Every structure is written in structure tokens, then in C-alpha cells.
Amino acid sequence: MAMVLEKVVPFGRSLDEYQKMFNLTAADFAGQILGVADGPASFNAEGTKQGYSITSIDPIYNFTGVDIQSRFDAVVNGIIEQIKNTPDDWVWDYHHSPDALRLSRERSLQLFLADYDTGKRAGRYITAELPTLPFVDQQFDLAVCSHFLFLYSAHFDKDFHLRSLQELLRVAKEVRVFPLLTLMLERSPYLDSMIQTLQATYDVAIQPVGYELQRGGNEMLVVRSRLSRTNGENAKPSSVMV
């Protein structure tokens, strides 16, 4: 089914946010990283300037930069207004206020748009979506999935989540997913089932992270191939194993 841009919320996040959402270290950035559902994040643009190898996928990359900017302009006022009207749902340690959040999203979008056409030509922005990805087995050292799996549990069923996680584990040695909450600020009803299924084959952990915007959304799921453990602190299992 073709994506309908009018149903998309094209909010992207910065490299610094990705570092905090996924506990990214210098060792992580030394490998091949896949960003899943990156949308108009500046993660790829900023990371590429620092010499990192990042590939971003999202169905939104079927559209032009002008289209994406237009959609952002159409929805940003309403979204920020909704955030202002639900003050108890948000933590402002990082962004400080709804208006500061808006400025951050605008900045990420502009950095993304400045890099978008060049990145598409270089193969860094690829039109693709879960649960089927156009990559060979273990092509990436790490796949990070931001604000898609689990967050949209009301829109995508348990089978979709499992097939998506299995596909990510096919193409990457390690997968990290953030956040673990739904849009209703509840732990995803699929999380326990995913953990139960995956831990038979993989190392599975829930780890705290240094980022929280949705209240209570300060954890990520980490799934790692047992055959690809590396030396170093970041490769060690979490203290919160499940």
C-alpha cells in the first residue's frame, strides 16, 4: 500500500537525541548503523559530517523535500498545541518547553533537508519499511528504531512487531528500540511477548537511557545476537535482563 503523506507526522530528532535515546558510544559509531523510521531526523546528516556510516530508511523518502517541509508546516502547530494542553504527559529536562521542542524539530528538519538530496544519491536515505528490508543478512552492526515499533501498538499488531524485529535481527547484529511506551503513555502490550519469543535465541535486555520526553519513556529494548558479542562495555548485557 502506498504511503499517504497526509497521515504522516514528519518530526525528526537530532544526533544528540539519538545518542541519548540509544546510549550510543564511540564504539557504536565505529560500525555500520541502520536508522529505522528515521523520517526527517538530522541523525544521518549530522553523523555523516562526523564521519559515521549511517543508512536511514523510511517510506517518507519516497517524497520530495518540499513535500516533507509542507507536511511538517501543516501539522506542527496542532501537535505543539496538543502538547501544551497535556502538561502532565511530558518531561522537560531536555527540551525545557514545548516551544523549545518546536525549535529543535525545526532545526532537525532543516539539517535533514539540506542533506536530503545528496544523501539519497549516496544511498544514505532509502525508501523502505518494515517488515521487509532490502538488505543482506548481517549487513549492519547496529539497527536503531526510533518512535515507531511499540509506540504505534494501536496501529500495528503483535505479528507485525515480531516479524519486524526478526527482520531487523536478520540485517543487524544488534537492535535497539526506543521508546517502549505507546502513544497513550502505557507500556506496549506486545513487549513481554516479544521478549519471551526472542530470548530463546538472542540476548534481550531493557536498558535505561538518558532521554525522556514522554513521561515514563526512558527505556529501550536491546536485542543482540549471541554470536556477535564484542569486547567493551557497551556489548555487555544489561543489569536488567528479561
Image: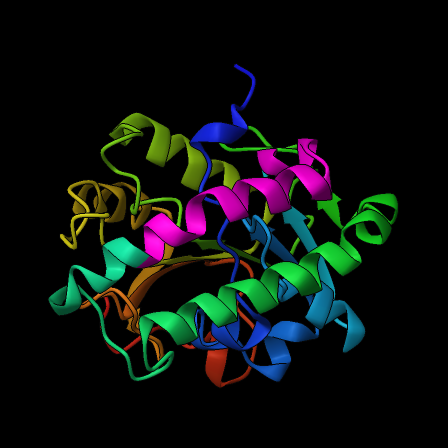
Note whether residue 37 is visible. no
Q: Which residues are magenta?
A: 59-80
Q: Position of residue 113 (x, y in %)?
A: 72, 55
Q: Is residue 91 left or right of residue 133?
A: left
Q: Position of residue 204 (x, y in %)?
A: 32, 58
Q: Is residue 96 left or right of residue 215?
A: right
Magenta stretch mostly in which secondary structure?
helix
Residue 96 quadrant = bottom left
Given residues 219 and 172, the one toward you in this image is: 219
In the rendered image, the vertical position of residue 121 relative to residue 94, given as above or below:
above
User: Which color scheme does this rendered protein use?
Assistant: rainbow
Residue 70 quadrant = top right
The total of numbered circles placed on residues is: 0
The residue at 51%/64% (across/down) is 105
Given residues 14 and 145, the one toward you in this image is: 14
Given residues 185 and 90, the one toward you in this image is: 90
The residue at 56%/81% (across/down) is 25
In the rendered image, the vertical position of residue 43 relative to residue 79, given as above or below:
below
Q: Position of residue 184 (x, y in %)?
A: 16, 48
Query: Is 40 one of the magenta-colored residues?
Result: no
Q: Is residue 222 left or right of residue 119?
A: left
Residue 21 quadrant = bottom left
Given residues 118 and 123, the one toward you in this image is: 118
**Quarter occupied by the C terminus:** bottom left
Note whether residue 229 is visible. yes
Q: Position of residue 98 (x, y in %)?
A: 33, 70
The residue at 26%/78% (across/down) is 239
Query: As drawn, which residue projects farthest toward the top?
Result: 1
Query: Is 67 one of the magenta-colored residues?
Result: yes
